[in-house]
Amino acid sequence: MFKVFGFYKFIKVKSLKKNKEILTTFFNNNNIRGTIIIAKEGLNGTISGRVSNIEKTKKKIKSLFSFKKFDNFNESNSDFQPFHKPKVKIKDEIVPMNLKLNSKERNLKTHLEPKDWNKLIKNKDTHIIDTRKPFEYKVGTFKKAVNPDVTNFRDFPKYLNKLKKDKPVAMFCTGGIRCEKTSVYLQKKGFKNIFQLNGGILNYLKKIKKDQSLWKGECFVFDNRISLKHGLKIGTHSMCSGCRMPISNKDKKSKKYEEGVSCPNCFDKLTTSQKSRFRMRQSQIYRAKKSGKNYLFQKEFK
């Protein structure tokens, strides 16, 4: 069993390159995989490993960056290693919005626990915003939630500037970090009734039972589990090898779906040569499986 640990922390970070080297070495020595982004404003990451190694890593991160608690974190299990390798990346922001955030700007009064969140979004006057990318929204979302259809989070403020200030705004994302920045941005714009789902969708799916849930579908995650359901159990979605987009069981029934080649999303976009190349790759995967070997392939760029 592998433990998957997602977290973020807004804290002043110095010596980015040095810390990157320390973390990379530690990850390699402790069989930790996944991605951590470090920036001057803090840390954001999702990593996985054996339970004992994840516990060691938590302690290492806290001691290295001199803090006692993560701003938010989530934990789930996987019976396989959901990441291929460890990555430590240096970025300008831990989530890009052209807005640098410090820990003092966080407004914890806007954070709602899942049960209180249910009450808020049942209010017909509440504007419910799914701050994630469109393809994540399609996999699953809350009832009556609106997705701004923004692929690049840096463009998100353009949507926010159109909102009416007199209505309650309820925001959510996978783990909560996007909403941290969005709530601060809206406060600076004069919004008063701003709320965010504490711990994001993952915290909601962990704490709210399915029969009491206002969530529809599954939650996309950026690892090889692809999607999660209530109780943070692995979902039913898989990944299209042609376009690297999540596909449902319904998509697989389409005439445009071909395993390892295409799905309804990319069938009409792929060239004949691309489909031919993907079929060749898929045939190699079949042969490898038949012989009992693993086939690992790099992402092919179109």
Image (cartoon, grey):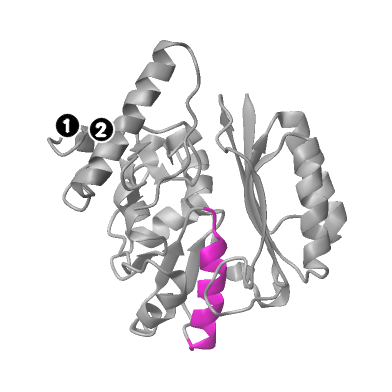
Q: Position of residue 66 (x, y in %)?
A: 86, 60
Residue at 49 percent across and 47 percent down: it is 222
Q: How many labels were placed on the picture?
A: 2
Chain part drawn in magenta: 175-190
Residue bearing the label numbered 1: 253
> Residue 186, percent across and down?
49, 81
- Residue sitting at x 75%, y 42%: 27
Give the distance between the C-alpha atoms of the residues marked 1 and 2, in whole angstroms: 7 Å
**Residue 261, visible in the rendered structure:** no
State the residue in front, 268 or 136.
Answer: 268
Give x and y (percent) for residue 264: 19, 44
Q: Nearer the viewer, residue 15 or 51?
A: 15
Give the residue pinned by disc 2: 249
Q: Residue 1 occupies which quadrant of the picture?
A: top right
Three-letter amino acid code at the position of disc 2? Asn
Q: Position of residue 148 (x, y in %)?
A: 33, 69
For label 2, count other residues whose C-alpha is less than 10 Å away and answer few (under 14), some (14-19) or many (20+): few
- Mark 1 vs 2: CB contact within 8 A: yes
